């Protein structure tokens, strides 16, 4: 398996991103929006759940 | 991915927002979520440039697949928990909750 170029470590600043997203609740037809990680700063903890592809079983 | 539905109130109680991220287009994500009856959190499209965000987090593999992984980011924007998982297995939720508990 190919290894990634680098890995992040605990305590490091999380790389910010702004991505196109479904609505606040995916799959319920709510309007699409853009979401930026730094919008949550000072407000909420964020759980980023990366997954390989849609239509995968888990 | 869908397994977090029943845990939603647990995330809310810990003042945590779940963001699902894949390299799919947002249309595909919306259709997928709909096929599961909808999710209580958004899905984000890391589709262009392909996997750019995943690469920044060090989880875009050489074969183009993204590792199934969890990053907890605290309110200060710092990484508080990392779990990079076998692609076929969902990351254990109890460990995510424990990581969030430490942040409160």
Image (tube, rainbow, N blue to C red):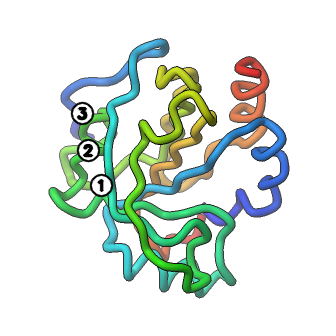
Is B65 on the left-hand or right-hand side of B93? left
* Separation of marks 1 and 2 at Cα, in angstroms: 5 Å
Horizontal and vertical percent position of residue B76: 52, 21
B61 relative to A19, above or below: above
Q: Do callouts 3 and 1 point to residues on the same chain?
A: no
Horizontal and vertical percent position of residue B103: 71, 20
Q: Which mark is residue B61?
A: 2
Horizontal and vertical percent position of residue B100: 72, 28
Residue ranking furthest to the top: A11
Residue ID for mark 1: B65
Q: At x 42% / y 36%, what residue is drawn?
A: A38
Q: At x 48% / y 85%, what residue is drawn?
A: B31
Q: At x 58% / y 26%, what residue is drawn?
A: B75
The chain that hosts pointer 3 is: A
Q: Secondary structure at mark 1?
A: loop
Is B31 on the left-hand or right-hand side of A57? left
Residue B13, picture quadrant: top right
Q: Secondary structure at mark 2?
A: loop
Q: Secondary structure at mark 3?
A: loop
* Separation of marks 2 and 3 at Cα, in angstroms: 6 Å
**Badge 2 density bin: few <14, some 14–19, many ≥20, Cα 10 Å:** some
State the quadrant of the C terminus of chain A.
Answer: bottom right
The chain that hosts pointer 1 is: B
Q: Which mark is residue A4?
A: 3
B40 relative to B81, above or below: below
Horizontal and vertical percent position of residue B86: 50, 45
**Badge 1 density bin: few <14, some 14–19, many ≥20, Cα 10 Å:** some
Residue B23, picture quadrant: bottom left
Q: Are marks 2 and 3 in contact (CB under 8 Å)?
A: yes
Q: Are marks 1 and 2 in contact (CB under 8 Å)?
A: yes
**Badge 3 density bin: few <14, some 14–19, many ≥20, Cα 10 Å:** some
């Amino acid at each position: 398996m190919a290894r990634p170029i680098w890995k992040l470590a605990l305590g490091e600043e999380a790389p910010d991103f702004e991505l196109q997203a479904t609505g606040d609740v995916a799959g319920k037809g709510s309007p699409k929006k853009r979401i930026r990680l730094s919008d949550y700063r000072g407000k909420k903890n964020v759980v980023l759940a990366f997954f390989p592809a849609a239509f995968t079983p888990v | 991915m869908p397994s977090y539905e029943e845990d939603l109130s647990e995330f809310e109680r810990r003042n945590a927002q779940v963001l699902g991220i894949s390299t799919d287009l947002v249309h595909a994500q919306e259709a997928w979520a709909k096929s599961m009856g909808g999710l209580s959190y958004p899905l984000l499209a890391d589709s262009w440039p392909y996997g750019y965000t995943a690469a920044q987090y060090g989880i875009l593999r050489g074969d183009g697949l993204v590792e199934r992984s969890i990053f907890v980011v605290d309110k200060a924007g710092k990484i508080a928990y990392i779990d990079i998982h076998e692609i076929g297995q969902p990351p254990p939720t109890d460990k995510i909750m424990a990581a969030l508990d430490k942040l409160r």
